[in-house]
Amino acid sequence: MSDDFDYSIFPAPERTHPAQLYLISPQDVGGTFPDRLRAALSGGGVAAFQLRVKGVGSHELADLAKPLQAICAEADVAFIVNDDVAMARRLDADGVHLGQGDGDVRDARAELGPSKQIGVTCHASRHLAMEAGEAGADYVAFGAFYPSATKPSDHRPDPAMLSWWASLFELPCVAIGGISADNVAPLVEAGADFIAVSSAVWDSDDPAAAVTSLQKAMQG
């Protein structure tokens, strides 16, 4: 659950750059998924793609990852590995995203080097976000802002938390959790630098159209 901090004293900051999409993979990234990813990235405006596949052996995951990583490279989209620092290093991925309990930012930095992106899930916690920033994270992620079937969560931060963060810190923040074209606008207005989505794109028969719809909604 979110804390009882009064975020209303922090107005939404004046935006100096447009928010961008951060796509998170579905569980099944085999079959035709590479073609769907290529379509989703074809129109530009996507900053990152996170490979989030659970319960798969490391060799199989590496084999699944390679074509997706190549597609991201072609589109100039950062390729991020979820939770697995060793896999991120094995693939020479652009970075890793750490959940709470999935490793320490400093340890990940020591293993991956200074040029890799390290993100941290901070749920609805100001304390966790500030700790991540102090440890050297490149971005923090707050959520779930809305109910999500992809990754159920009891954490429900107030969108104004994004305004608080953006008003006080230069470190980028990501909004995540149940986000769609219908509900993304308040998160962008509040100050999210990146909007993380999964089912809003991959549940669509036309991922490219879904991305375009989200981008239009993000522009207001």
Image: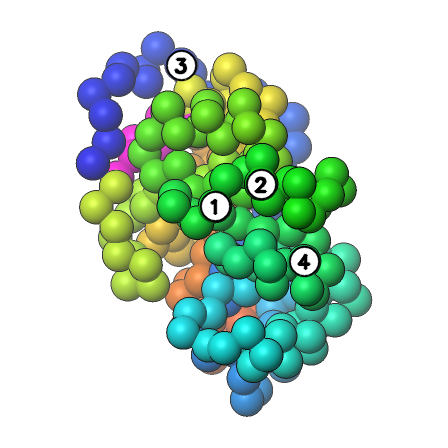
SS state under label 2:
helix
The residue tagged 1 is: 103
Q: Amino acid at mark 3?
A: Phe
Instruction: State yes or no: discs 4 and 3 in contact (Cβ < 8 Å).
Output: no
- Spatial CA distance of label 4 from label 1 is 14 Å
Determine the residue positioned at 32% across, 46% down.
Answer: 144
Determine the residue positioned at 55% across, 28% down.
Answer: 135
Mark 4 or 3: in front is: 4
Disc on the earlier residue, 3 or 2: 3
What span is colored magenta in the figure? 156-162
206 relative to 79 in the view: left or right: left
- Spatial CA distance of label 4 from label 3 is 39 Å
Disc on the earlier residue, 2 or 4: 4
- Spatial CA distance of label 1 from label 3 is 31 Å
Q: Is residue 90 above or below residue 190?
A: below
Neighbor class of circle 3 (other Cα within 10 Å; few <14, some 14-19, many 20+) is: some
The outermost residue toward the top is 9
Question: Which image quarter holds the N terminus?
Answer: top left
Instruction: State yes or no: discs 2 and 1 in contact (Cβ < 8 Å).
Output: yes
Q: Amino acid at mark 2?
A: Asp
Where residue 88 sits, quadrant-wise, is bottom right
Mark 3 or 2: in front is: 2
Residue 10 disc label: 3
| Location of residue 41 in the rendering, given as x and y in whole percent from the top left corner | 66, 65
Magenta segment includes 38: no
The residue tagged 4 is: 89
Q: Amino acid at mark 4?
A: Arg
The residue tagged 2 is: 107
Q: Amino acid at mark 1?
A: Gly
